[in-house]
């Protein structure tokens, strides 16, 4: 482990720059500091959903783009959009798109359920990819020389602070639960990222949590039973792909 830390030193200055940009820029849009939400809501519904999905995590993506070139100058970065298999990454992504679009999602936007489901799932995937470029694509690479418990604890804590959930919800229980979820998620998605080197594969597991619990686009539909079925089908299929991916990696090594 000592050799690892020496080989992959952490630049805390670079990490801090990334996190300041990620938090400041994202929350300018999330808290609508410039009062642009009314203008976006006047756009066609499908477009407004995609614009919000692009803007809210944009600070994470921007921070990554700014600091990543400096990290690449120091050492090889293994994470990429498709990782070690473009085919498997795209297959993982296609499963929830096809499934949600086929099922349909009730909505208040007066969009046909299947069209809305397609737009909502595409928007959510875009959102998750932007986040995952930061948390796994950059931050996990930056901290790769640390012990796993320290790496995932730091990522989870930064991920929690980035959301600023404590600003509008002062409940200690809620915030501790959310923090614990993000630390656990940092470990779980981090393991996927380590095996696949794929931002898109990581985004898929991020996506399922969004559908089940966090994303307002799916808050009231599908119902809990349908969401559970979606969860089981997606995660079951993903783990089959993941184990095949891991087997292929071990064989090539």
Image: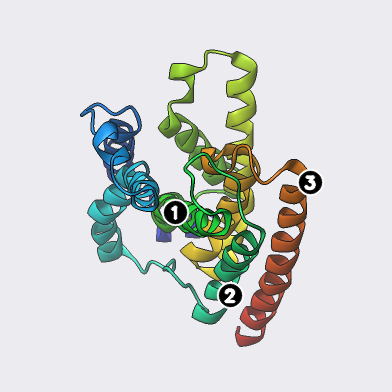
Distance of label 2 from label 1 (alpha carbons): 18 Å
Q: Position of residue 58 (x, y in %)?
A: 31, 46
Query: The residue tagged with tag 1: helix, strand or loop?
Result: helix
Identify the mark nearer the N-term, 3 or 2: 2
Query: The residue tagged with tag 3: helix, strand or loop?
Result: helix
Q: Does the residue at mark 1 contact the one at mark 3 (Cβ under 8 Å)?
A: no
Please identify the quarter of the rendering in which residue 150 is found: top right
- Residue 153 appears in the picture as rendered: yes
**Which color scheme is applied?**
rainbow
Q: Residue furthest bottom?
A: 252
| Disc 3 crowd, CA 10 A, few/some/many (<14, 14-19, 20+) | few
| Disc 1 crowd, CA 10 A, few/some/many (<14, 14-19, 20+) | many
User: Number of callouts in the render?
Assistant: 3
Q: Nearer the viewer, residue 226 or 32?
A: 226
Q: Looking at the image, which residue is at 56% across and 44% down? A: 152
Q: Position of residue 54 (x, y in %)?
A: 34, 50
Residue on which the image places disc 1:
123
Circle on res. 72: none
Q: Position of residue 160 (x, y in %)?
A: 49, 32
Residue on which the image places disc 3:
225
Residue on which the image places disc 2:
91
User: Is 11 on the left or on the right of 80, as rendered?
Assistant: left
Identify the mark nearer the N-term, 2 or 1: 2
| Disc 2 crowd, CA 10 A, few/some/many (<14, 14-19, 20+) | some
């Amino acid at each position: 482990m000592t050799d690892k830390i020496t080989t992959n030193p952490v630049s805390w200055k670079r990490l801090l720059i990334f996190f300041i940009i990620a938090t400041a820029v994202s929350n300018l849009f999330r808290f609508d500091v410039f009062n642009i939400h009314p203008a976006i809501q006047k756009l066609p519904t499908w477009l407004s959903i995609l614009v919000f999905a692009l803007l809210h995590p944009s600070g994470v993506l921007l921070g990554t783009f700014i600091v990543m070139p400096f990290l690449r100058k120091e050492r090889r970065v293994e994470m990429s959009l498709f990782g070690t298999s473009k085919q498997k990454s795209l297959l993982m992504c296609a499963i929830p798109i096809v499934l949600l679009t086929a099922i349909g999602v009730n909505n208040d936007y007066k969009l046909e359920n299947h069209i809305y489901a397609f737009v909502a799932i595409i928007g959510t995937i875009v959102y998750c990819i932007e986040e995952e470029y930061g948390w796994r694509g950059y931050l996990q690479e930056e901290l790769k020389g640390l012990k796993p418990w320290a790496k995932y604890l730091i990522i989870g804590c930064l991920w929690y602070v980035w959301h600023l959930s404590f600003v509008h919800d002062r409940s200690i229980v809620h915030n501790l639960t959310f923090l614990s979820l993000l630390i656990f998620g940092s470990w779980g998605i981090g393991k996927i990222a380590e095996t696949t080197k794929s931002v898109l594969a990581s985004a898929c597991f991020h996506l399922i949590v969004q559908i089940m619990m966090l994303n307002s686009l799916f808050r009231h539909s599908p119902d809990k039973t349908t969401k559970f079925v979606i969860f089981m089908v997606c995660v079951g299929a993903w783990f089959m792909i993941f184990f095949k991916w891991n087997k292929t990696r071990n064989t090539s090594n």
